[in-house]
């Protein structure tokens, strides 16, 4: 067992509340992420199975751990709530991984905390499996995200729309500090707390900034840059977070909270899956703008740190946040050009070429992931166009676009083999398709059959490989398989 530290627990009282996980009725370990466990210093061969079950179900807390629930506020669908906090999660502590980085270990679904607001603090099995599948898939796709270390049944039941089995996911993060964490202290008028938190974030995530003359504007700028790159990567794989509240945006630049998230099947810019997003606030195309909006709320919270003169602080912060748009556009276009096989210096018509493809895909109801994966082979062999054309309701619309695409490819000097490899390294064959996640959840909840879950996790760990024996997992859903809504699980 690695040594646990209590770094965040050592911060002042307003930042957190101490609590213990609830005792599970009859804990049962579903799975442990062996590769991640090794990375974190867990020697699974030397830990008794009963001890692993106890740790990952909340039945036992390591002797050197000091569990806390983290306090934070947040704008939820645009409305500010001054106190939220971890209502069903406990930060057990931090461990130092093999690379020397400090990583949070958190139990999610471990029972009520002082921030539960009359909730039960539990998690149902379905949302636990969804978070495990999607967070690990995001990591394998190369997108910064919290990780899933383990999943366990508690033996308890939780009451949602129906009675469901309770479960816990053990989540690993660079940290669980959010935009809402800063908002919580700002709402209290706690300027000293803001300074302590900002210094903690710099030390943990941006140590190079500590020597700067103006570290706090630099911190805001660094967070803006990371979020611009992160959301660009979401857009490039068709990921829809579903609930981009300010309490669901980390300052480390990791994707967090995989509740009503989903991936596009047929490309639709306005697509919404989340059952709680009635107005489409967090639709696929809105994500960059909402990320910038969230960062503006972070800037507001940080104003007392940026400059003692409020007007000057606003001017500095505004200049930093406005820069998000250009940073996002640069990162997004670079990734989309690569998805189309363009790796040389950008040309003036490249943005139009990308936008025309997306418009053609939307009109033709083409599957986002399958279309871009099929482009890989078509980029080096026009005979492979048939596979791409099959994704479009009107294949001739693709043909018209492909003429200009091939003309543009001819100006890019990368060789065919090199281009194919590079395109396949950014266009996944496998994503966590909504209907496949649902199948895995139904099998586990209704039959205690975890084989579909285990298969999905294993295949998604290698998303850029063809894996022909699992080709069925690349297929778009049939009409009767489509998942129209995803749910938060709280």
Image: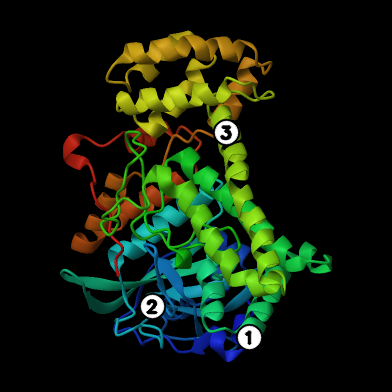
Q: Name the residue under label 3.
A: 333
x, y (%) of residue 195? 68, 78
Specify which label sits upstream in the sequence, 2 or 3: 2
Determine whether the residue tagged by mark 1 lies in a helix, strand or loop.
loop
Residue 11 marker: 1
Total numbered labels placed on residues in the image: 3
The answer to whether residue 37 is visible is no
Label pair 1/3, CB-CB below 8 angstroms: no
x, y (%) of residue 202? 71, 69
Q: Which of the pair 127/113 is nearer the observer? A: 113
Label pair 2/1, CB-CB below 8 angstroms: no
| Relative to 298, residue 52 above or below | below
Q: Quadrant of residue 243?
A: bottom left
Q: How crowded is mark 2: few (under 14 residues within 10 Å), some or many (20 or more)?
A: many
**In the drawing, does residue 379 fall left or right of residue 75?**
right
Of badges 2 and 3, nearer the viewer stands 3
Of badges 1 and 3, nearer the viewer stands 3
Instruction: Check the picture and name the quadrant holding the N terminus.
Output: bottom right
The answer to whether residue 219 is visible is yes
- Point 43% across, 58% down: residue: 244
Q: Which of the pair 56/314 is nearer the observer? A: 314
Of badges 2 and 1, nearer the viewer stands 1
| Relative to 402, residue 321 above or below | below
Q: How far apart are marks 1 and 3 (CA)?
A: 41 Å
Q: Which of the pair 77/140 is nearer the observer? A: 77
Determine whether the residue tagged by mark 3 lies in a helix, strand or loop.
helix
x, y (%) of residue 155? 27, 78
Q: Name the residue under label 2.
A: 88
Determine whether the residue tagged by mark 2 lies in a helix, strand or loop.
loop
Specify which label sits upstream in the sequence, 2 or 1: 1
């Amino acid at each position: 067992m690695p040594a646990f530290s209590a770094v965040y627990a050592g911060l002042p009282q307003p930042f957190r509340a101490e609590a213990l996980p609830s005792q599970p009725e009859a804990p049962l370990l579903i799975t442990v992420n062996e590769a991640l466990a090794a990375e974190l210093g867990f020697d699974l061969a030397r830990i008794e199975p009963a001890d692993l079950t106890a740790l990952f179900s909340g039945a036992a807390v390591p002797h050197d751990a000091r569990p806390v629930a983290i306090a934070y506020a947040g704008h939820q669908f645009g409305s500010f709530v001054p106190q939220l906090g971890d209502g069903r999660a406990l930060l057990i502590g931090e461990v130092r991984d093999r690379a020397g980085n400090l990583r949070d270990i958190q139990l999610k679904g471990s029972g009520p905390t002082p921030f539960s607001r009359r909730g039960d603090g539990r998690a149902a099995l379905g949302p636990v499996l969804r978070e495990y599948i999607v967070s690990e898939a995001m990591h394998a796709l190369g997108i910064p995200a919290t990780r899933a270390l383990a999943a366990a049944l508690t033996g308890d039941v939780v009451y949602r729309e129906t009675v469901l089995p309770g479960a816990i996911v053990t989540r690993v993060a660079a940290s669980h500090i959010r935009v809402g964490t800063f908002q919580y202290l700002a709402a209290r008028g706690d300027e000293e707390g803001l300074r302590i938190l900002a210094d903690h974030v710099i030390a943990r995530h941006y140590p190079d900034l500590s020597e700067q003359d103006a570290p706090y504007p630099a911190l805001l700028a660094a967070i803006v840059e990371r979020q611009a790159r992160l959301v660009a990567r979401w857009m490039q794989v068709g990921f829809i977070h579903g609930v981009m509240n300010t309490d669901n945006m980390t300052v480390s630049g990791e994707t967090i909270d995989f509740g009503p998230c989903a991936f596009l099947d047929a490309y639709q810019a306005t697509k919404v899956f989340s059952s709680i997003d009635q107005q489409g606030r967090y639709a696929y195309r809105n994500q960059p703008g909402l990320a910038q909006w969230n960062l503006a709320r972070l800037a507001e919270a940080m104003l007392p740190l940026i400059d003692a003169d409020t007007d000057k602080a606003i001017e500095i912060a505004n200049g930093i946040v406005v820069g998000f748009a250009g940073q996002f556009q640069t990162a997004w276009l670079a990734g989309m050009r690569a998805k189309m096989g363009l790796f040389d210096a950008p040309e003036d018509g490249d943005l139009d070429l990308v936008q025309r493809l997306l418009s053609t895909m939307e009109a033709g109801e083409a599957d986002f992931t399958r279309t871009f994966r099929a482009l890989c082979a078509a980029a080096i062999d026009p005979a492979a166009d048939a596979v791409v054309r099959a994704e479009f309701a009107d294949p001739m619309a693709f043909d018209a676009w492909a003429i200009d695409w091939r003309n543009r490819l001819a100006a890019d000097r990368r060789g065919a083999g090199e281009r194919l490899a590079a395109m396949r390294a950014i266009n996944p064959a496998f994503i966590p398709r909504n209907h496949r996640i649902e199948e895995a959840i139904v099998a586990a909840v209704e039959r205690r059959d975890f084989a579909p879950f285990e298969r999905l996790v294993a295949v998604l760990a290698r998303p850029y490989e063809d894996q022909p024996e699992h080709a069925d997992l690349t297929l778009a859903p049939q009409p009767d398989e489509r998942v129209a809504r995803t749910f938060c699980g709280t």
